[in-house]
Amino acid sequence: MIQSINSIPAFDIKQQYATIEAEVSATVLEVLSSGRYIGGPLVEAFEQQFAAYHNVTNCIACNSGTDALFLALRALEIGAGDEVITTPFTFVATAEVISAVGAKPIFVDIDTTTFNLDLQQVAGAITPKTKAIIPVHLFGQPVDMTTLMAIASSHNLAVVEDCAQSTGASWDNQKVGSIGHLGCFSFYPTKNLGGCGDGGAITTNDPELAAKLRVLKEHGQKNRYYYEEIGVNSRLDTMQAAILQIKLRYLDQWNHQRQAIAAYYQQFLTQLPGIVAPQELAKGVSVWNQYTIRISSEGRNGSSTTYRDSVRTQLQERGVSSMVYYPYPLHLQPVYQYLGYQPGQLPVAELACHEVLSLPMFPELTHEQQDQVIYALKDCLV
């Protein structure tokens, strides 16, 4: 057995902060001394820069990725009686917001190699009640947006891209979040572009949707104290906007580092027996928010979940932390029992929940640390 020298976390946001501490500290002090903590020029500047980065005309900052999705559906006037197609293999927020606006989530199984929506099954799930599709660019891996937009266009459906894990990723040389009708982003601290707290944003080239989003996120008011519809309080605070401005300047560098780390993993793990390494599509550029493998239990005793969890425990004993995203598919969660999905109905997603394991991934991860991960993993699979 290979003994670990140092423990390796699944992610480490403190190392990233250390590289920009001086810039962030100076900016934070400026914001604190300004007395302007909500809205203002810094938030507006970040919105403009984020829009320019994605080559879109509008960015609307808000207080979380969940709110970004919720506001997007509200702006599209999706509600009771409507259906929205999405994936069962994602964080609950993707489906949660569909329910929150009164619509019905329709879950479609995932692709075996990318963990993203199986687009061949999307068309078959469309009904007269379908109003939108929410593709999730999971783990930083872009969905085939060419095919998806063709499906959506042929059925006159809106596309809301869930880009929570994929800021900077692209499909066919176009940034995700700029291809669908709306792009929704999270700035949760562990994301590729993460703040020092919660935050989110919506991107769009549609001026009418952008104007509506700005009203909805400010209590439904266009003019102060004059309310046109029921809105919410969803603002990105000035401190987060100031920090995100700094981090946006480093985003491409950090994403390139993630891509190099993924390539190093690929070099050694692709042919490892019992491991199914992630794959990129030809036109997609992933930004690897997670590097997620599958631990196959084929030919071994016990269930796939038991084997994956055993490998994870052994890795931890060797000083290597890992994460499971996600252990339970959404269509079988208690909150969605009323939809009537049964075990085995979406088999690829269900199997993925039993087999996936996310290895350490953050821009500052060294080759020496990766070697420790790789050797430990080989040792566990013997």
Image (spheres, rainbow, N blue to C red):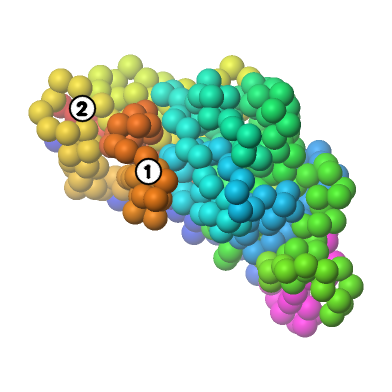
Q: Between label 1 and label 2, give the one nearer the viewer.
A: 1
Residue named by callout 2: 297
Q: Residue at x 49, y 59 (%)?
A: 14
Q: Is residue 36 magenta?
A: yes
* The C terminus: image quadrant: top left
Q: Say how many tags the image has.
A: 2
Q: Residue at x 74, y 39 (%)?
A: 181
Of helix, strand and loop, which mostly describes the magenta segment? helix
Instruction: Specify the quadrant of the image occupied by residue 378.
Output: top left
Instruction: Specify the quadrant of the image occupied by residue 158.
Output: top right
Q: Residue at x 89, y 73 (%)?
A: 223
Magenta segment boundaries in residue numbering:
28-47
On screen, 207 above or below 21? above
On screen, 124 above or below 22? above
Decide which of tag 1 and tag 2 comes sooner along the chain.
Answer: 2
Image side of residue 348 versus residue 165, left or right: left
Q: Residues within 10 Å of mark 2 (few under 14, many from 20)?
A: some
Q: Is residue 234 magenta?
A: no
In the drawing, what numbered circle is on residue 340?
Answer: 1
Q: Position of residue 154 (x, y in %)?
A: 71, 24
Indicate the amino acid at tag 2.
Ser
- Secondary structure found at label 2: loop
**Residue sitting nearer the eye, 375 or 152:** 152
**Residue sitting nearer the eye, 362 or 350:** 350
